[in-house]
Amino acid sequence: MKTTGTWQAILAAATVLGLSACGGETAVTPETPAAITAVANACVPLPITGLCSNGDPSIFLKTNPQAPKLAAKCAWRTKEISLTPTDAIVFRAQDCTAEGWVPNLYEVVQGYIKQRMDGTPEDQAVFILEMLPVAAGETAEQTAMKTLGKAPENQRERCETRQLTGPVLAGSAFELAPKPDLAAELETASGGEPWDACGPNGVTMDAVQFWEARPSYALFHMLGQDDEPWDPASFTFYRKGADGVWAKAG
């Protein structure tokens, strides 16, 4: 793949556009908005799926058009992670290297997607998504309820799934939350301090986390407290066909 040649061609085209628009008085450099936009829109095939690197919304089941940009020069890029030789998960995340920021790395570890800055030790990566396969004849909500085995024993029968309407996702959002009586007890016992309930896949007052129902997966999103560099709406499963072509699989 001749990535260097691609970038040179893009920058050359941007320079020509800048010169023609300004009578030859202003050159477009790699730092100008026109050049940054041209590079961001370039379609560089990714090594696993062959999808474009440019974060085009058509690549994903859904994107959130209101997802905040972290900085002016950040650009959406397509990220891909291999799950099996014929399965991959694809999503979009912001590349802020034009701002001088360290790039983020994404990897799968035992059913989780983790994110860390390049150069950060792997044991300091943060969890951003858990992928739990939904068994035949089961719902994503039932799959989520099974994680109550990790909750305090006195809470396991006092939690339930509850639909959410806020998150922008490709599937439907829900949470694993305490029933009203348990929530009241926790609120009283906390003395106004943050509390959590229903185990690590439940609710917490310290971060944003919720479930997403897909036909074959229950996805648990862990967003933390700050704006995230990835788009939670964009997670899309791809499968490689017998013809070698990758296609959306949910």
Image: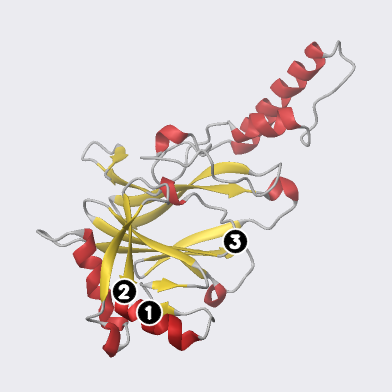
- The image quadrant that residue 117 belongs to is bottom right
Q: Label 1, on which residue?
A: 184
Q: Amino acid at mark 3?
A: Asp
Q: Is residue 46 visible?
A: yes
Q: Amino acid at mark 1?
A: Ala
Above or below 191: residue 138: above
Query: For the residues carrying marks 3 and 2, which lies nearer the camera in this image?
Result: 2
The reply to whether the C-beta atoms of the residues labelled 2 and 1 are less than 8 Å apart is yes
- Could you give the CA–CA distance between mark 1 and mark 3, rounded to whole angstroms? 27 Å
Above or below 191: residue 205: above
Q: Is residue 199 visible?
A: no
Give the residue drawn at x 23%, y 71%.
Answer: 145
Apparent side of residue 155 relative to residue 119 in the rendered image (left or right): left
Give the residue drawn at x 52%, y 73%.
Answer: 206
First-in-chain label (1 vs 3) = 1
Q: Amino acid at mark 2?
A: Pro
Above or below 218: residue 76: above
Residue count near mark 2 (Cα–Cα under 10 Å), binned few <14, some 14–19, many ≥20: few
Give the residue drawn at x 71%, y 55%.
Answer: 101
